[in-house]
């Protein structure tokens, strides 16, 4: 088994540790991720059923995705960094923000979601498969 995925916010208040491999790693160019990241896309590692430890009191902002999925975006109340996402209706899923990893080099995007909302200036690797919205199998 590989090393746990460890990360946190810039000021160090919020920390997390996930034991296991991500089911998928993807960029997302939806408007929410643009606002969340402050640039053209979010980069996320999605873990399913992996043991997760978190520390620090994250602020939670709950949003509803286009498909009706409730998402809770956890960010640091002090430095404001987005650190992870959870789903009130899918407690087994944990999504870490790639930039919050202690070693962001472990992030390797496998697909791009919501490419239809992307901008020309946010140019991503042409070799990575792109979907207009969500990939069909997870819609
Ligand atoms: Zn912080
Ligand atoms: Zn998104």
Image (cartoon, grey):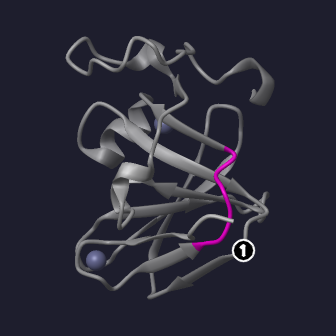
Count all numbered tags in the image, as a single digit. Answer: 1
The x, y position of residue 69, in whole percent, is: 70, 44
- Determine the image quadrant of residue 87: bottom right
> Could you say which is closer to the camera, residue 113 or residue 6?
6
Q: Eyeballing the image, is 121 above or below 89?
A: above
| Residue 48 in which image quadrant | bottom right
Q: Position of residue 85 (x, y in %)?
A: 55, 59
Q: Residue at x 25, y 80 (%)?
A: 78
3 to 126, vertically: above or below? below
97 displayed left or right of 63: left
Extreme front residue here? 1
Question: What SS does tag 1 mark?
Answer: loop
Q: Nearer the viewer, residue 19 or 137?
A: 19
Helix, strand or loop: magenta stretch: loop
105 or 57: nearer the eye?
Answer: 105
Instruction: Kindly identify which residue carries mark 1.
Output: 51
Relative to 43, is 130 on the left or the right?
right
Q: Kindly identify the residue that appears in the image at 25 percent across and 11 percent down.
A: 120
Q: Position of residue 3 (x, y in %)?
A: 56, 69
| Magenta-drawn stretch contains 92 | no
- In the rendered image, the quadrant that contains the N terminus is bottom right
23 left or right of 8 in image: right
Residue drawn at point x = 55 percent, y = 82 percent: 54
Extent of the magenta region? 18-23
């Amino acid at each position: 088994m590989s090393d746990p995925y460890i990360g946190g916010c810039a000021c160090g208040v919020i920390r997390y540790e996930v034991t296991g491999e991500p089911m998928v790693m993807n960029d997302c160019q939806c408007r929410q991720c643009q606002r969340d990241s402050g640039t053209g896309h979010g980069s996320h590692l999605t873990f399913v059923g992996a043991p997760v430890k978190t520390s620090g009191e994250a602020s939670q902002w709950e949003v509803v995705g286009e498909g009706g999925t409730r998402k809770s975006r956890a960010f640091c109340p002090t430095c404001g960094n987005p650190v992870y996402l959870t789903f009130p209706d899918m407690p087994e899923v944990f999504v870490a923000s790639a930039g919050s990893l202690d070693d962001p080099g472990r992030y390797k995007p496998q697909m791009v979601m919501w490419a239809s909302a992307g901008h020309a200036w946010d140019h991503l690797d042409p070799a990575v498969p792109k979907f207009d919205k969500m990939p069909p199998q997870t819609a």
